[in-house]
Structure formats: C-alpha cells, structure tokens
C-alpha cells in the first residue's frame, strides 16, 4: 500500500498539471522588448488606423480575442481556416457570418513581421494586444498585456459550438460557462461589459424584444422598428446606447432594463450579479480597473509557451 506521503505527492502533481492546463504565470509584459522592440508599437498603428476607418472594428477585434480564449485556450485557433485536417472554428454557431476583423489581423501580422525582420510575434499575442488597443482607441483605459503565447496547430468546430456563450443563456448557464474556463462571477460581469461597444444581429435578440417582460417598453418598441417579427434577421442593433464608445453605458442600460441580449439583461434581474452591475453603472474607475484585470486573467487560459505550438507565418494556416 502506498504511503500517505505518496498519495499527497501524486495529488500535488496532478493539481500542478491541472493548473498548468488552464492558466499561466510565465507570460511577461516585456516578452518582445529584446527580440522585437517595435512589435507593440506596430500593432497599435495598424489597429488605430483600422478602428478610425471603421469604429465597429474595435468591438470585432475585442471579440476575436474573447472567442479565441474560450475555445481550447488563447492559441490563435479562431483564426485558422478549415482544411482537410482542421475543422475551423469560424463555422461555429457563435462565429459564422458574425466574427469580423480577420483581414485586419492579416495586416497586423504582415506589418509586425516586417518590423521584427522575421515571424517572432504569435497570432495569439496579436489578438491579445489588438483587443487592448481597440478598447483604448474607443476611450477605454489601457492595461499591460502579458505576452509570450504561441500559436496552436489545430482548431475545433465542435469545441467552439460547445464553449462559446450564447445570447439566450440564463445567469446560471453563464456562470457555468465562465467557470469552465477558470473565470468567476465578477469576471463574467466585467467582461460582459465589453458589450459597451459593438452591435448584434436581430436574430440574437428578436425573441427578447417580442416576448420578454424585463425590458423597457419604449426600448423594445424602438428595436421592433428595426427587427420585425419575421425577416430582417441580419439587421443590426447596438449593444448599448453609446456603442462606439468604451464606457459604462452598458451597465446603466441594464439597470434601466435596456440590455439588448437576454444574456445581458440576466446580469441585472434580481440575481447575485445585480450589485456588481449597479456598482459599475456608477463607478467608471472601478469598471476600467477590473476590466483590465479580467482581460489579463482571460488571456492566460490554457496558453501554449516555450516549445509548444508554433509562431505561425500566416495566421490563417499552420506552418
């Protein structure tokens, strides 16, 4: 029979493996300082130009990073095109004809590889930095992005269909969804605040504006003018009433029952997250600080480091 010390050793070893699979403490904010000191400046230049040309692009680039990290970790897999051996995530229910910004990522990759003289910046890191720079360009506060991720060599359509939170989820389902990737209730609320920028298709909120009761009647009436009961599914509605500015309007809208998606309004509907929503609705400094912390935390989900994965030469395909 094994000793109690032996059992303890095995348990601690298994725990270490489990933690390594879900997060990382090895990323560094100075990862590219020596090998490519112009990397972050170059990414910012391309992001700034893209967002200035199309204000929606800021939300699109933020969403790419989110949808990457929630599916098998922050490994750039969301960028991979489907091949005979890879079932790309772009075709998943939460991504198909919805995700945007792939062409901007291509431009960033080309520019940063030129600046560095060779491919040293991963596509996964490009997504993390572009998300931060997009938020800043739309008025949000910056944070120090931790870097050193490497790119995955595969993708999973089925994992994307199972892992990405949908617009019709209940509060309990959202909590479970975030818990599955190591994020807690506060992370759920503060990262949902990313919906302070961007738009959504009518198909994602049509049921809410016609059937739900926890919604401001005038808000619902105005949206019905854009989204009829039948047809018009691809028409767009703003995720909050100042959808091109990164601010706290999203939380103010929730308090006033003007959340666009069902999965937005459940955060303020008599449940355990109400207090956080109310706090962020009146405290922009708290939201800005906590958003950066949660983005850093999300950016550590199951990252590849060291000799794992690769640095892709083209973000759309493996080397």
Image: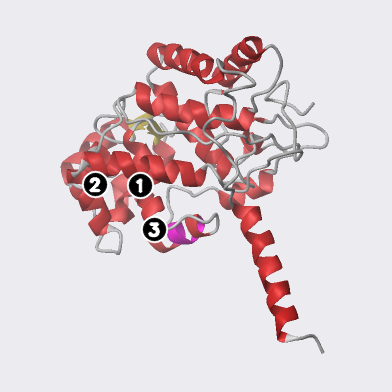
User: What is the magenta range?
Assistant: 173-177
The answer, for residue 259, to whether it is visible in the render is yes
Total marks in image: 3
Q: Position of residue 53 (x, y in %)?
A: 41, 11
For the residue carrying disc 2, how many other residues have a C-alpha within 10 Å: few (<14), some (14-19), or many (20+)?
Answer: many
Magenta span includes 134: no
Residue nearer the viewer, 269 or 295: 295
Which residue, given by chain and number where applicable, does mark 2 sit on? 280
Quarter of the image where one finds residue 151: top right
Query: Which quadrant does the N terminus fall into?
Result: bottom right
Q: Earlier in the sequence, mark 2 or mark 1?
A: 1
Q: Position of residue 4 (x, y in %)?
A: 71, 85
Q: Earlier in the sequence, mark 3 or mark 2?
A: 3
Q: Residue at x 56, y 18 (%)?
A: 39
Label ID, residue 190: 1
Element type where label 1 sits in the image:
helix
Which residue, given by chain and number where applicable, does mark 3 sit on? 185
Cα distance in 3D space between marks 3 and 2: 14 Å
Q: Residue at x 42, y 63 (%)?
A: 172
Task: Identify the coloring.
Answer: secondary structure
Q: Position of residue 184 (x, y in %)?
A: 43, 58
Q: Earlier in the sequence, mark 3 or mark 1?
A: 3
């Amino acid at each position: 029979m094994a000793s109690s010390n032996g059992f303890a050793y095995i348990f601690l070893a298994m725990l270490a493996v489990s933690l390594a699979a879900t997060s990382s403490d090895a990323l560094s904010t100075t990862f590219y300082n020596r090998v490519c000191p112009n990397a972050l400046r170059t990414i910012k230049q391309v992001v700034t130009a893209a967002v200035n040309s199309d204000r929606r692009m800021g939300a699109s680039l933020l969403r790419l990073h989110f949808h990457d990290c929630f599916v098998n970790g922050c490994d750039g897999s969301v960028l991979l095109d489907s091949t005979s051996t890879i079932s790309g995530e772009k075709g998943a229910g939460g991504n198909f004809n919805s995700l945007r910004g792939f062409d901007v990522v291509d431009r960033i990759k080309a520019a940063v590889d030129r600046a560095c003289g060779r491919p040293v910046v991963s596509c996964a890191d490009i997504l993390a930095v572009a998300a931060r720079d997009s938020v800043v360009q739309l008025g949000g506060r910056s944070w120090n992005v931790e870097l050193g991720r490497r790119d995955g060599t595969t993708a999973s359509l089925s994992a994307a269909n199972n892992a990405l939170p949908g617009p019709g989820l209940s509060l309990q389902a959202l909590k479970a969804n975030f818990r599955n990737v190591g994020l807690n209730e506060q992370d759920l609320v503060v990262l949902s605040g990313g919906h302070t920028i961007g738009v959504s298709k009518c198909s994602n909120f049509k049921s809410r504006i016609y059937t739900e009761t926890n919604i401001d009647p005038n808000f619902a009436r105005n949206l019905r003018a854009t989204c009829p009961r039948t047809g018009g599914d691809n028409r767009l509605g703003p995720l909050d009433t100042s959808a091109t500015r990164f601010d706290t309007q999203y939380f103010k809208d929730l308090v006033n029952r003007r959340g666009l998606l069902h999965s937005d309004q459940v955060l303020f509907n008599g449940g355990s997250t109400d207090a956080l929503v109310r706090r962020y609705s009146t405290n922009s400094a708290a939201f800005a600080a906590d958003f950066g912390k949660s983005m850093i935390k999300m950016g550590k989900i199951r990252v590849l480091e060291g000799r794992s994965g690769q640095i892709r030469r083209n973000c759309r395909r493996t080397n």
